[in-house]
Amino acid sequence: MLLEIKNLHVHFKGMRGTTEALKNMNLKVSQGEIVGIVGESGSGKSITALSILGLLEENAMIAQGEILYNGLNLLQLEKQELQALRGKEIGMVFQEPMTALQPTMKIGKQLYNVIKKHRKLSKQEAKEAVIQALKEVHIDNPELVANKYPFELSGGMRQRVVIALAMAAPPNLLIADEPTTALDVTIQYEIINLIKELNDKRGTSVLFITHDLGVVANICEKIIVMYAGEVVESGNTQEVLQQPRHPYTKSLLQALPDSVEPDEPLQAIEGEPPNLLNRPTGCAFSDRCKQVMDICRVEHPELKESGVGHQVSCWLEKVTV
């Protein structure tokens, strides 16, 4: 197993108390596999990614759990040891490329610095690798682009550059955090295909984080659905999307444009996610669930098998099985 997160709990300490941002997070990513994490904003998707890389804010605390990369517990590494893995073993594509790139440094220089840090190449070989890295993400006129600053490029072009930076080492694991956000549909499709191509070509494993179930259907083999910092459903992508078991997953699918007729309104999920400063005793989705039962409000459902390779955390599922 390339990456395995076991029973991870992440808390944030603040002026008003402690926020339980992740609760009992578990996931597995095998070599060459693309696994998707989906959920609303604030569901814990990005916190999971930042926990893997050791990039959480100073007020964050790993209360419990393990993050194993090739059997090595990343939470037990010294700061310098973890830094050595970033970029070289684990690459990251951030959701906002403009903040991920150094605005006062040319694209070629940024790529050159990453390549020189992680690969034993001469100065000339590193320069050639810069051009090759830009070619691999299908950037036309790479020599010209290498001589530009980030603000001179379009959003889609900047995202390609960020992917080139993340893959420059190249890493065994690529974490893509909302890589298609704020891009138009055509560019989204190109970025998705680019990540799939790099996965096929290099065998790079991908942890793909998104709020868009349509994107997940196009790229991921497995899916993890998160709500309020917890995994509420997981399994094979096609099975989860075609036979969702958790009311939250069903609600996400019903909110997709393809789920309604052209003249019908989208089915919004009513209500708001819970305040994680005061996490509900029972199911975190109970206040928004149309199928809520008494037990849902008082007792928390554990994530259990519901078919081969399909897991769900829902009292309704346990009652009906």
Image (spheres, rainbow, N blue to C red):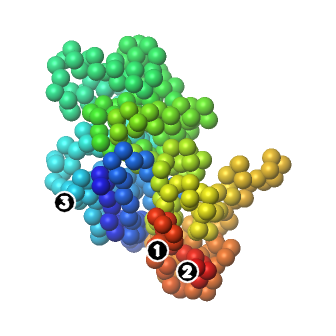
Q: Secondary structure at mark 1?
A: strand
Residue furthest out toward the right: 263
Mark before the other along the chain sequence, 3 or 1: 3
Q: Position of residue 60 (x, y in %)?
A: 32, 62
As drawn, 200 above or below 294: above
Q: CB of mark 2 within 8 Å of CB of mark 1?
A: yes
- Note whether residue 148 is visible: no
Judging by the rendered image, the residue that carries numbered circle 3 is 76
Judging by the rendered image, the residue that carries numbered circle 1 is 304
The amino acid type found where label 2 is placed reads: Lys
Mark before the other along the chain sequence, 2 or 1: 1
Front one among 92 and 217? 217
Residue depicted at 61% across the width and 80% down the height:
320
The amino acid type found where label 3 is placed reads: Gln
As drawn, 184 above or below 20: above
Residue 318: mark: 2
Front one among 267 and 72? 72
Front one among 180 and 235? 235
Q: Position of residue 209 (x, y in %)?
A: 46, 49
Mark 1 neighbour density, 10 Å: few (under 14) some (14–19) many (20 or more): some
Left or right of 1? Residue 309 is right
